[in-house]
Amino acid sequence: DIYRNGIQWGNATGVVRWNHEFNRKLFGNATINYTRYRFDLFSEEKWIDASTTELSAQRYFSGINDVSAKVDFDFLPTPNHFIKAGAGVTWHQYSPGAFQSKVNTASYNIDTLLKRSFLRSHEYDAYAEDDIKISDKLKINVGLHFSAFLIQGKNYSSLQPRLSARYLLKQDMSIKASYVQMTQFIHLLTNSGVGLPTDLWVPATSIVPPQYCRQAALGWAWNYKNDYEVSVEAYYKTMRNVIEYSEGASFLNTFDGWEGMVESGKGKSYGTEFFIQKKKGKTNGIIGYTLSWTNRRFENLNEGKTFPYKYDRRHDLKIAVVHQFSKRFQLSADWVYGTGVATTLPVAVYTDASNREIEVYTGRNSFRMPAYHRMDIGLKWTKQKKHYERAWLVNVYNVYNRLNAFYIYRDSVYDPATQTERNVFTKVTLFPIIPSVSYQFKF
């Protein structure tokens, strides 16, 4: 037997921009942008013997096409005001999902494509903000964002105020605070169980409303002799109308209408970010650490109890160091660590009277995949020529070959001692150690 599966995704984008300085106080630009996002997942199994080859394959694919046009202006009426304003429109085309099933055996041949029609929408937005210098110590930024989303005859609109302030305690030390309200007309629909991870972007519809959030943040920063920068920032965010798959639903049922397979609920995210940077000298670098919680609650999921979101990451750490041996030779290294993704795993499996395999679960996202960590290093050797600068780069991704889990699936193995099959969880990894050599030049 030959079994393979995979996942492909990516973006293609194109931008045209026109800038113009009307006078010393007014500057504007106009932008036309095109983006195309695609997500493609496939699973295939072949059975080969001396005379025949049998095939069973499934493929799921979805995507988003966007065309947008916008204008932005920067206006400086006085030295104490910096005003930004603009407006734009975006044409969205969503293909929330298509599922293709193919079976080719000696007795029958099936090739079926089940596809939803495209969803099209229009999004309009306008904003204005003013960066105001109250005094040498105090600056504030006040703004208002308006957005509207038209889809399936439904019109959603939203006013989103923003406010931030920065106060200098000393010349090299400050505190800052901010408050924002935001509306998002696109949802991330993701599975958190065993099998290939699927992050699908689906729009708000006449049935599924957009999501709203409020976020407040408070921070402190210290810039010591322009050599070291230290900052601490805490944030608290509440969300409503977030969505999650209903119990027993999955992306493979998308052709039945994904709106009927999701639950709408509330979310909460909060944490503290720490940052240290050394800017000067032959050796410099950064240390960034975030301690955070991200939870969800749905009336009809997990018995109405709060559970961690798939991307709840308790600890997130990055350390990066660059050492300049000379003007021509540089060594860099960085190390990242993150708490494992929250996932839902069965704790038992049994066969019912109809010979169906039934999985038993205790709670949603009650398990964690192994922690993610890796180290990358790079060497850069530059040389200045008469008309250009050239550089050789040698990089090693995942130096110690950490096999980080991309996803987990349930499998069975034969136990010779008991002469029975037993269930095991197996992790699938993507990127081992990867060395690379590149050449670049600047002129």
Image (spheres, grey):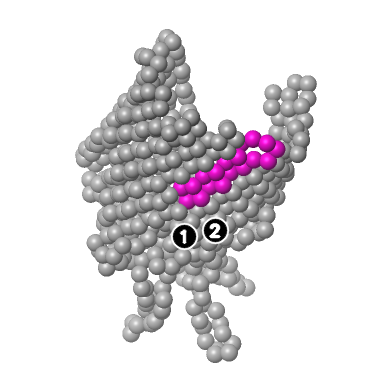
Front in this rendered view, residue 236 or 423: 236
The residue lying furthest to the top in this view is 23
Q: Is residue 59 visible?
A: no
- Report the residue marked by disc 1: 341
Tell me the chief SS of the magenta region: strand
Cβ atoms under marks 2 and 1 closer than 8 Å: yes
Front in this rendered view, residue 137 or 357: 137
Percent x, y for residue 231?
A: 48, 42
Q: Which residues are magenta?
A: 273-290
Q: Relative to 367, is 240 above or below? A: above
Q: Is residue 391 visible?
A: yes
Amino acid found under the numbered disc labelled 2: Tyr
- Residue pictured at 69% horizontal, 27% vertical: 442
Amino acid found under the numbered disc labelled 1: Val
- Residue pictured at 48% horizontal, 30% vertical: 171
Percent x, y for residue 332?
A: 68, 44
The disc placed on residue 372 is 2
Front in this rendered view, residue 109 or 330: 330
Q: Secondary structure at mark 1?
A: loop
Mark 1 crowd level (few <14, some 14–19, many ≥20, 10 Å Cα): many
